[in-house]
Image (cartoon, rainbow, N blue to C red):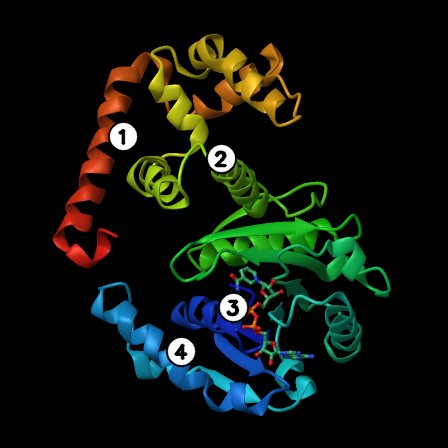
Amino acid sequence: MRVNHAAIIGAGAIGVGWTIVFARSGLLVNVYDLDEKQLESFHSRVEERLKLLAENQLLDRDINEILGQIHTFKSLHDACANVSYIQECGPERLEVKKSLFAELELITSAHTIIASSSSALKPSVMAAELKNPERFLVVHPANPPYLLPIAEVVPSPGTNSETIKETMELLTELGMKPVQINGEPEGFVFNRLQGAILREAYCLVRDGVISAKDLDLVVTQALGRRWSVIGPFTTSALNVKGGNRAHAARMADSYHRMGLERGQNDPWSDELVEKVSNSIEQDWKVEDWEKNVLRRDLALMHLLKFIKQDPDLTF
Ligand SMILES: NC(=O)c1ccc[n+]([C@@H]2O[C@H](COP(=O)([O-])OP(=O)(O)OC[C@H]3O[C@@H](n4cnc5c(N)ncnc54)[C@H](O)[C@@H]3O)[C@@H](O)[C@H]2O)c1
């Protein structure tokens, strides 16, 4: 691992989350926040979560050893001077992020990668005034990153390929599942998907179709449970014998009409369905359809067994 020493800027919820991801894999972690109270409570907030992870057999290293790798700093310069990767976790305000990056560019080596956790700010906008935008990009986590391993790696047009490659490799070594997002779409992908569901959910409640409570039940008792083991494309592939092509042949018109009701005219073209099928079939062959349906069911059974073991988990 080229990166064995990282810095976290901003010791809030996401700063704690990334620190656990880095430190549990053996990295040294420097933490900076301009609020000293956040630094004073930092180790105890990390420790609380590490204990919970250990109690649930999700930590294979000694807690004190991990805590010993984490150091807090009252100076941005001291925190970042000797690190090769920085994960910025400050507030979601463009002017704060821009001024932090301008300072970081001056005080770090030319090889230090600067990643922002931003949920919605475009990397090209945040990097607009940087002299060296090639080592800057967004690495957007799900919250909390030590339990939800996806990381959206969003380069700006100015980010160089070496920075993207090194960041993807680092995240993989840390046990994360990095996905590269192209073109800086508003909300990246995680929040666009979340937003699509949430927008429709609000419309359905507004129109009196379902109560908010029952809508949540539809997700927790079916959609969400299924999506925790297979994604929406694999779900479609396994819902209709014959995979995504057969699913689209049967359902595409209905989904198109649902979109039109919300002013969205995005039919699935044959080429698009072909592209999706070819990608999904790399892991879920159509000729193994029956076997794959059982594979899905078994994964759901394992999940259900765990949920049923703890009545507090059946909300
Ligand atoms: N909370 C989430 O669910 C979530 C998920 C993914 C990404 N993010 C993104 O991560 C970032 C951090 O979010 P959060 O929820 O941890 O916020 P937070 O409010 O919990 O923490 C922000 C921290 O930054 C500190 N801070 C403020 N100005 C600073 C500065 N100039 N320099 C250094 N530190 C400064 C604050 O004192 C605070 O401790 C945001 O960009 C957010 O959009 C949040």
Q: CA distance from mark 4 to mark 3?
A: 11 Å
Figure quadrant of residue 211? top left
Residue bearing the label numbered 2: 204
Residue bearing the label numbered 3: 14
Q: Which numbered disc, 1 or 4, marks the residue that appears first in the sequence?
A: 4
Residue bearing the label numbered 1: 296
Q: Which numbered disc, 4 or 3, marks the residue that appears first in the sequence?
A: 3
Tell me if label 3 and label 1 are in contact, CB under 8 Å: no
**Outermost residue, left side:** 309
Name the kind of residue labelled 4 in the image.
Val
Residue bearing the label numbered 4: 46
Q: CA distance from mark 2 to mark 4?
A: 40 Å
Q: Nearer the viewer, residue 169 or 184?
A: 184
Q: Which numbered disc, 2 or 3, marks the residue that appears first in the sequence?
A: 3
Name the kind of residue labelled 3 in the image.
Ile
Give x and y (percent) for residue 257. 56, 16
CA neighbours of label 4 inside 10 A, class few (<14), some (14 to 19), many (20+):
many
Q: CA distance from mark 1 to mark 2?
A: 29 Å
Q: Which numbered disc, 1 or 2, marks the residue that appears first in the sequence?
A: 2
Q: Which numbered disc, 3 or 1, marks the residue that appears first in the sequence?
A: 3
Q: CA distance from mark 1 to mark 4?
A: 35 Å
Q: Is mark 2 within 8 Å of ligand 1?
A: no
* Residue found at x 82% / y 63%: 132
Q: CA distance from mark 3 to mark 1?
A: 32 Å
Name the kind of residue labelled 1 in the image.
Arg
Figure quadrant of residue 78? bottom right
Mark 2 lies on a secondary structure that is helix
Residue 188 image label: none
Numbered marks: total: 4
